[in-house]
Amino acid sequence: MLPLSEYGKHRYAVFVLAFIFAIFSTLMASPAASQSPEIDVSTAAVVVIKKSLAGRFMFLKPHFDSGAIGLTIDGLVAMRDLQAIALAQTLKVENFIAEENKDRATLYREIARANGRPDWESDIKAIFGERWISRAPVGWYYRDITGKWIRKM
Amino acid sequence: MNFSKRIFSSLTLIAASAFACGCGSITFFPSAPAQKAADNIIDEVWPASQPTVPVITVGGSKETAPAPVVTPK
């Protein structure tokens, strides 16, 4: 290996700095430059899922209100208190929860797919998880990341 | 071409490639638009969960609006 002259060292340092700057500007500038302004949620599949979720909501709402079921941080619905549900209704509620979760999982996957980024599914799921809880009425329960049920105040 | 020149050329090439790739292909998850889209969907599927009060317009049609905030006198 040939030793670098003083001038060579200087030029070497300039190029290294230029390289670091290029990497830094790539990381910092591209989010704003390449972010799509909107998320497309207008596909036929999303519309169908929304109708399905809306149709089921009127059945699930009393159980959210009573605290029998609650929201989870990962954007799904879970049984919280079986005692709060009449025995005859238990199986029905469980089936509705399963269908609701299936629809929600499909919704997240479909939104990611509709935007050409299947790898965004987990991000979309996380955003929905936070937004369902944030938009839920006071008194509803949600399960946090530690698995603890919390009543929304 | 001596060793240092080769390094300079390589670094320049790598820097240019990294910048071009970064500008062209890296797309970060757009959190704000995604949050807005999620809120719109939630409004549609949970219409009854939002507190609303009826509002009668001049034309006589009924609509709903967010519950007003009551402040003490």
Image: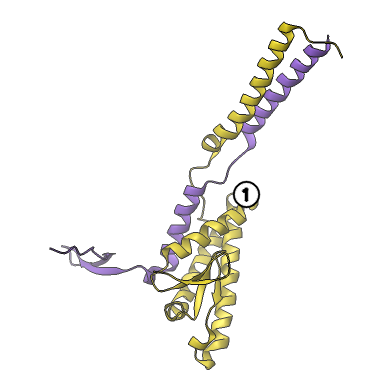
Chain colours: A yellow, B purple
Relative image position of residue B46 (x, y in whole percent): 42, 68
Position of B10 relative to A146 (above/below)? above
Relative image position of residue A40 (x, y in whole percent): 52, 51
The residue under the point 66% across, 32% down is B21
Which quadrant, please, contains the C terminus of chain B? bottom left
Provide the secondary structure element on which disc 1 rests: loop
What amino acid is at disc 1?
Arg
Q: Chain of mark 1?
A: A
The residue under the point 56% across, 62% down is A107
Relative image position of residue B27 (x, y in whole percent): 60, 41
Instruction: Determine if residue A52 is in view.
Output: no
Quadrant of the image occupied by residue B4: top right
The residue under the point 43% across, 58% down is B40
Position of A96 relative to A13 (above/below)? below
Instruction: Determine if residue A100 is in view.
Output: yes
Would residue A126 appear left or right of B67 to someone viewing this image? right
The residue under the point 85% across, 11% down is A2
* Front residue of this view, candidates A134 and A3: A3
Give the residue at the far bottom of this rendering: A88
Would residue B68 appear left or right of B29 to someone viewing this image? left
Give the residue at the far right of this rendering: A1
Give the residue at the far left of this rendering: B73
Would residue A5 appear left or right of A58 to someone viewing this image? right
